[in-house]
Image (tube, grey):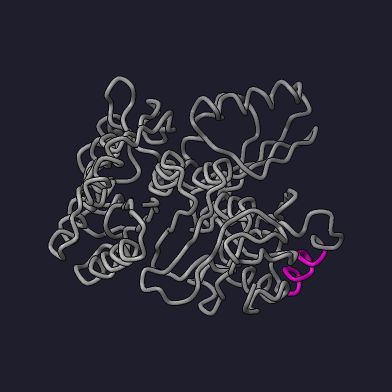
């Protein structure tokens, strides 16, 4: 019997009715002749009892700076609860199931608490359960270091668990179930009628994920690309055909044609702060730049949209890091300004590489929408602009219209 990996997000597990729907998707796989291996996220979202954000709030009510090892141990509980509850739901319906932690499923990681990376996967226990006609229900987002410490893989890490398990089992396809019917051309919270993208390349979905789209974890896509695993993003209620993520552009895999349009989607990151360091005339600019970046790296500050000139160093950070950055840079004797209230909006598409005029269309559409641009960057598959957060909805709407992303059948 061929293995198939199904991953279910936390929003698909919050109620008994939803869990019955999830169970039906699993039972359908068994009836089709597959041996399902299930990976689950923590139930619900912020505010729900067992959601990851709720567990974070719980530990922060005790300590504002918890020990990372303690934090990971606590956060791993959310997915364990999901695995046990779904396994018992399946058992109640007459489908034998066994809940497993990440480490019981053979996932070994390094010891980078909060953002651990998988070193190896030994699927022996998963294979054993399946051979006993028992569905393994694995807690995602977690593993164990070689020294026995419980670790987590970072937000969205259940996607990584699912694809890593699939690679170890040599699966061809991983199905990722969510509360929407696939990857949209824009955030449906901003563009409610944004259509589902039928097919994306690995590179396109990684760009979308890195740039703020809530799709698939980029590290999961990297594993899938290396192992040649096709990803399918589907709605748990099975409305629509979902999104296939596979090689491209222009190629076919799993019957889905990869779009060759210039832009396939829009992503955005709100709550950005713009940092500008000026007054460099009296300093060695290269030495100051290196000193700034080294200080930020040592303090675990991620920076983006970097601009360098003899007169100015500029970049953006997450709003949550503003106080830390101000403290870190205060002792350098430089003119540092940190302005909040920005957002980063990006157009993404493998088809834009080498195509003249894409930047002109981005700038023109934002200008016509009266959205000022403060900084830009681009790669072979995206163009990003720094804008005021208050202009985010207008910017997304303008770019959505300019690149005709409302068209069906992308």
Taking 187 as reference, is 55 above or below it? above
Residue furthest out toward the right: 356
Residue 261: quadrant of the picture: bottom right
Side (left or right) of 397 relative to 37: right
Q: Is residue 341 magenta?
A: no
Q: Magenta segment, principal secondary structure?
A: helix
Residue 207 percent location from the top left of the image: 62, 52
Side (left or right) of 338 relative to 300: right
Count of picture labels: 0
Viewer-proximal residue among 154 and 47: 154
Viewer-proximal residue among 404 and 328: 404
Viewer-proximal residue among 365 and 136: 136
Q: Residue at x 65, y 66 (%)?
A: 257
Q: Residue at x 42, y 33 (%)?
A: 118
Viewer-proximal residue among 95 and 273: 95
Taking 373 as reference, is 167 above or below it? above
Side (left or right) of 315 relative to 17: right
**Residue span colored magenta:** 360-368
Residue 175 percent location from the top left of the image: 43, 58
Residue 319 percent location from the top left of the image: 49, 48
Taking 399 as reference, is 84 above or below it? above
Residue 277: quadrant of the picture: top right
Q: For the C terminus, which image quadrant?
A: bottom right
Q: Residue at x 41, y 69 (%)?
A: 235
Q: Residue at x 20, y 39 (%)?
A: 62
Residue 246 percent location from the top left of the image: 60, 55
């Amino acid at each position: 019997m061929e293995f198939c990996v199904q991953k279910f997000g936390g929003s698909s597990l919050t109620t008994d009715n939803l869990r019955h729907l999830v169970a039906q998707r699993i039972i359908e796989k068994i009836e089709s002749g597959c041996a399902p291996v299930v990976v689950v996220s923590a139930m619900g979202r912020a505010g729900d009892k067992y959601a990851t954000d709720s567990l974070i709030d719980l530990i922060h009510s005790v300590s504002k700076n918890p020990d990372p090892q303690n934090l990971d141990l606590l956060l791993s509980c959310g997915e364990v609860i999901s695995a046990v509850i779904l396994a018992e739901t399946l058992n109640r319906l007459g489908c034998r199931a066994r809940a497993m932690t990440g480490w019981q499923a053979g996932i070994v990681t390094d010891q980078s608490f909060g953002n651990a990376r998988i070193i190896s996967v030994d699927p022996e226990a998963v294979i054993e359960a399946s051979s006993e006609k028992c569905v393994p229900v694995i807690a995602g987002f977690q593993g164990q270091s070689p020294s026995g410490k419980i670790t987590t893989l970072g937000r969205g890490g259940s996607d990584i668990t699912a694809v890593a398990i699939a690679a170890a089992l040599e699966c061809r396809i991983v199905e990722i179930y969510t509360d929407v019917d696939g990857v949209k051309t824009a955030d449906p919270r901003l563009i409610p009628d944004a259509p589902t993208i039928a097919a994306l390349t690995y590179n396109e979905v990684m760009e979308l994920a890195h740039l703020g789209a809530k799709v698939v974890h980029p590290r999961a896509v990297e594993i899938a690309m290396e192992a040649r695993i096709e990803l399918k993003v589907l709605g748990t209620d099975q409305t629509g055909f979902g999104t296939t993520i596979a090689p491209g552009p222009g190629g076919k895999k799993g019957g889905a044609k990869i779009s060759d349009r210039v832009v396939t989607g829009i992503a955005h990151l709100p709550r950005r702060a713009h940092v500008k360091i000026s007054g460099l005339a009296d300093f060695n600019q290269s030495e100051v730049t290196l000193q700034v970046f080294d200080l930020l790296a040592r303090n675990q500050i991620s920076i983006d949209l970097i601009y360098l000139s003899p007169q100015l160093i500029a970049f953006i950070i997450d709003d949550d890091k503003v106080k830390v950055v101000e403290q870190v840079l205060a002792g350098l004797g430089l003119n540092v300004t940190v302005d909040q209230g920005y957002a980063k909006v990006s157009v993404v598409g493998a088809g834009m590489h080498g195509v003249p005029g894409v930047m002109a269309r981005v700038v023109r559409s934002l200008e016509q929408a009266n959205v000022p641009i403060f900084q830009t960057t681009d790669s072979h598959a995206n163009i990003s602009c720094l804008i005021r957060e208050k202009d985010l909805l207008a910017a997304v709407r303008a770019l959505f219209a300019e690149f005709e992303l409302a068209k069906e059948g992308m």
